[in-house]
Image (spheres, coloured by chain):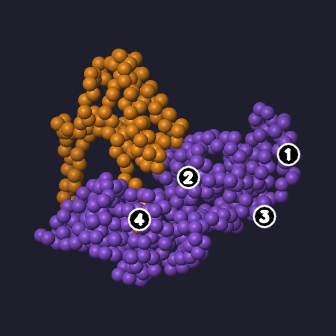
Amino acid sequence: MITDEALRELVPAVISVLCRRGADFAAAEDAVQEALVESITAWANDPPRDPKGWLVTVAWRKFLDLVRSEAARARREERSESLAESGAVPAAEDSLELYFLCAHPALSPSSAVALTLRAVGGLTTRQIAAAYLVPEATMAQRITRAKRSLAGKRLNRNGDLASVLRVLYLVFNEGYSGDVDLAAEAIRLTRQLRVMSNHAEVAGLLALMLLHHARRPARFAADGSLVPLADQDRSMWDTVAIAEGVEILQTALARDDVGEFQAQAAIAALHADALCVEETDWTQIVDWYDELARITDSPVVRLNRAVAVGEADGPLAGLAELAHLDENLPRYFAVEAHLRERAGEVDAAAALYSRAAAAATNTAERDHLTLQAARLNSSRS
Amino acid sequence: MAKYLMLKHYRGAPVPEGFVPMDQWTPEEISAHMQYMSDFAAKLQETGEFVDAQALSPEGTFVAYGGEGKPPVTDGPFPETKDLIAGWMAIDVDSYERAVELAGELSAAPGKGGKPIHEWLELRPFLEAPPTVTD
């Protein structure tokens, strides 16, 4: 019996086949979802030898049913039937166009994410809704609207790769922890994309994901609380994922076409390389933040750079960097608290940790910062 | 992608200018108001931004642990409590700007004389899941 993941891997290729045979994307996507539903019962007793061929056949039939039920049936059907005979089933690599379409710049980020997870990832609307903690009807509507706003747009190999990478990064970085492991799904989709696109940033993004995913077992304590990088039990890091991430990154960097994701991955790789936090090569990390700041000009990057400077050259140097930045930046006070504590200003640090906790945008970070404030407050009394 | 709560207060929010309590509206005005609210929710469902909408009874009870082997202690309601939540609508939107736009639209619900009530809604972001990439 085919695994759920292997089945989902077939989805973009099957949609692509239907599109190439003349189906428009929205109808093709619906037809493939219907075929997937049918496969659950049909395959339970009689699994096909060629699951992809089965899906193409059934999805095409579903598509024709859809077409037949529409007004202009005669002409469209004729065209579809004649187109159907010409196409051999292409390989999975051909779903690159689908990545482009689902991440089309005309879509809002949340729509592009939802559509990518469904049409490229093969997840059901219910799974996507559960993963993002919204009602299924809301997610269904979001997907329908996204498809509607793509009406008339054709599958095209000259899509915007940067948009695709941003969507995959969002899936990876902002995933909730529901039944569907969005981080693992983002890695799977990026891995699949890398087979089809040899752009260095695709490799950079995959390396970045692998290197961060490798730390996941160490990121949370048994009670669910956040463990910061410096305190993580590094023996829990996934060395296989790290080795793969580093190798992919090195190959990408050798091409001398550095971009945002490669630079971020390089920073993650330097952390991964240190057996204990004291061994971290902060000087090189600062260099990579400089590179990243040149590429993105992001204030968040400069904030993280101040942390690295604080480690490389001491907390006072870090605070000097921080003085140039806007205190309204997310995590600004958390960074300042950490630097002040290291500079020996315990009272100021405790107050700043509390202030940072109040400004935190997620509960794990808020609880962690509250804990830091409490630790300093109780050490003084 | 961020979730926000639009909180509607019975009490505790600033009072809009020319405020008239609902029991002094005509039945038609109340009905127009209700229609606006349900149309608004339906619109959010259609745009794929709706998460939840609930109304709360103004009367509630305070409950606390009563100690080992004892039943919970109840108290209240406290009519003097400053803040009183009437209900909420939760939305999932692409930006803070969009959340503000929607809250403004909800606050334009018609009241006395069919004019927008300009009710103050409190917009509160949900705390999110922690991001994976932090360094």
**Chain with colour orange in the figure:** B
C-alpha span from label 4 to label 1: 52 Å
Give the SS element for disc 3.
Answer: loop
Mark 4 and mark 1 residues within 8 Å of each other at the beta carbon = no
Using a 10 Å C-alpha cutoff, classify the residue at mark 3 as few (fewer than 14 neighbours), some (14 to 19) or many (20 or more): few
- Please give the chain letter of the residue carrying mark 2: A
- Looking at the rendered structure, the kind of residue marked 1 is Glu
Q: Is residue A170 above or below residue A247?
A: above
C-alpha span from label 1 to label 2: 33 Å
- A206 vs A215, left or right, is right
Say if labels 4 and 2 share a chain. no
Q: Which mark is residue A81?
A: 1
Q: Residue at (58%, 67%) from the top-left corner?
A: A257
- Please give the chain letter of the residue carrying mark 3: A
Instruction: Give the quadrant of the C terminus of chain A.
Output: bottom left
- Looking at the rendered structure, the kind of residue marked 2 is Val
Say if labels 1 and 3 share a chain. yes
**Chain with colour purple in the figure:** A
Q: Earlier in the sequence, mark 1 or mark 3?
A: 3
Depth check, mark 3 against mark 2: the one in front is 2
Residue behind mark 2: A113
